[in-house]
Amino acid sequence: MELSWYTSPEEAEDSGGATFASDVYRLGVLLFELFCAFETMEEKIRAMANLRHRVLPPQLLLKWPKEASFCQLLMHPVPNTRPKMSDVLQSEFLNRSRNSLEEREAALRLREEIEEQELLLDFLLQLQRRKQDIADNLQDTVAFLSSDINEAIRQQPALGQCGNFSFELDKEVCSGTVEDQSDCGSRKRFRPELPAIDMEEQNRSVEECSGTVPSSVLIQESVLSKSSRLMKNFEKLETAYFLTRSKLARHVGNPISSCHQVLRRTTGSPVVTEGSSIDDFALEGHYGTRQRGWMNSFLEGLCSYLSFSKLKVRAELKQCDLLNSSNLVCSVGFDRDKEFFAIAGVNKKIKVFEYNMIVNEHRDIHYPVVEMSNRSKLSCICWNSYMKSHIASSDFEGIVQVWDVTRSQVFVEMREHERRVWSVDFSLADPTKLVSGSDDGSVKLWNMNQAILFLHLAGSVGTIRTRANVCSVQFQPDSARSIAIGSADHKIYCYDLRNIRAPYCTLVGHTKTVSYVKYVDASTIVSASTDNSLKLWDLSMNQARTIDSPLQTFTGHTNTKNFVGLSISDGYIATGSETNEVFVYHKAFPMPVLAYKFSVADPISGQEIDDPSQFISCVCWRGQSSTLLSANSSGNIKILEMD
């Protein structure tokens, strides 16, 4: 069929060979096939039959009129009427198509260029918006920085009224009127003012002081030391400053970036913002007080952060216990008057030492003043804040005991826990109340008055059931009705003991087991976890039953699997690390203030080595002082002091 379709009329009538004119006819048939599409073969056969008579389909005539006309010209029945090949190549039909293609390609190139320009414009606009946002934020930052600088400058004249105090201090130092107040601290006390003398005599007396450094020199050295530490930790302090500032903006509900700011951008003048919540500075007596508000809090935190430069060893407890292969110390604690401290651990013993004897008397071996043996490994101890000789303990068999240290024996034993007890705590507000937390998922409440009535064995007065192992419990410091629980399910639960069916608040934020909980005050809690972090929580800022935003997250130490200790004193937070280091944080900043690494000596060569298996196992501040008792997994116990 195709052979007959492409055969020209003259070839069909004459059996002669093909000519150029018949080739042109075949081009016409090919052109027709290119522009006509058929759904079935029958339709195509009918159309090709009509084409022999130069009858074209209506749709071709309507859609492609010029192409249909050129097709009829190529298939003209008279061979001489058909165009020559040169005419075909120069025809408007082919040239128009070529020009149209070039125009289409040019249009595509133009469109690509336009799209590229639009892409560039979009990139530049987005970049401009981002940089503008950065500029706006920077402008806000400069605004509240200028406001804070202005407030700090405003305080200086008031503080300047106290400027003469430094000279008076120098005079008293040289007169020998400054002496140590006590063994526990480094505060100074002063005698009444000396009679006034002229300036030359004062200067001469200061210069002639033998072996005494004027306080102004000491203050200058202290300032230089603090300045050095400030620059060393500048980036971390900067982050803490802006974090504190942003919390203030959220708390007052009037952020610095609000449209109600009033900025004075005159050269050299500070920028005052309506969002600033700075209270007026007020003097109280001769010395005065710093302004209240967030700047006061940040300044106090900064001063506390820079007050100490290192942890130094004040004493090392040297003991000899050859009968036990493991000397891991699990818990340490000071008694009511901070005169004695006790240690307990896997050697199944509670040892009590006199603090002053350890610090002041250097001996080859220190022996405890009291030593009490237990049947099982000990996990935790807690002194009673009222009964000086009473100390509670918990052990690996789930037994809670209260010991009388003066008699070196147990006088109350509590056996209700089914598994290991990790934590015990006496209430500071009511010393007759005791709480314990266990691996069996329960928290037991005990009343010492009832325990004494039943002589040796005592029953609990309340039980809190939880869904996971309980690792830590502690009473609220000013109430015997509230406790905090650290759980293996990564959460902290706060209970009101008048309703123990459900916690009144749950703290969510840790990603692994919560190993310790400690109250900073009645409404603030610090938690430790094996996720390498400590977290500070404020119970008063949120009335919801669940709090998932801690005030602060402290990182820097390593803690992934062991109990490493947690203790709090006057805003300083001490914890251990699995790198065999003691870390001290301050509640105002997320980075460590100080760190001290326990040295490990090779038993044969005596040289210092790195033992990755050793870790700090417990820490305890000596009340509200700068002295810290710490112990590690090998039984090495040191008394450290912030210096």
Image (spheres, grey):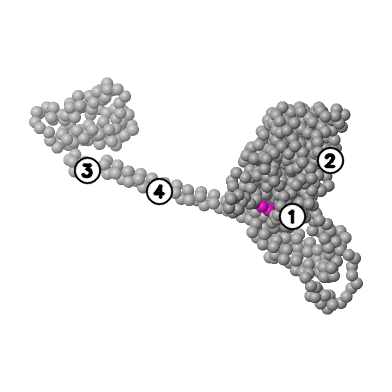
Q: Amino acid at mark 4?
A: Leu
Q: Please tell me whether mark 3 or mark 1 is closer to you in this view.
A: 1
Q: Which residue is mark 3?
A: 89
Q: Amino acid at mark 3?
A: Leu
Residue 594 painted magenta: yes
Q: Please tell me whether mark 3 or mark 2 is closer to you in this view.
A: 2
Which class describes the residues within 10 Å of circle 4: few (<14), some (14-19), or many (20+)? few
Upstream in sequence: badge 3 or badge 2 = 3
- In the displayed structure, 280 sits above or below 471; it is below
Tell me if 204 is positioned left or right of 597 in this view: right
Q: Amino acid at mark 2?
A: Thr
- In the displayed structure, 87 sits above or below 22; it is below
Which class describes the residues within 10 Å of circle 3: few (<14), some (14-19), or many (20+)? few
Upstream in sequence: badge 4 or badge 2 = 4
Q: Which residue is mark 4?
A: 110
Q: Which residue is mark 1?
A: 362
| Residue under the image location 17 percent in, 40 percent down | 84
Which range is magenta? 593-597
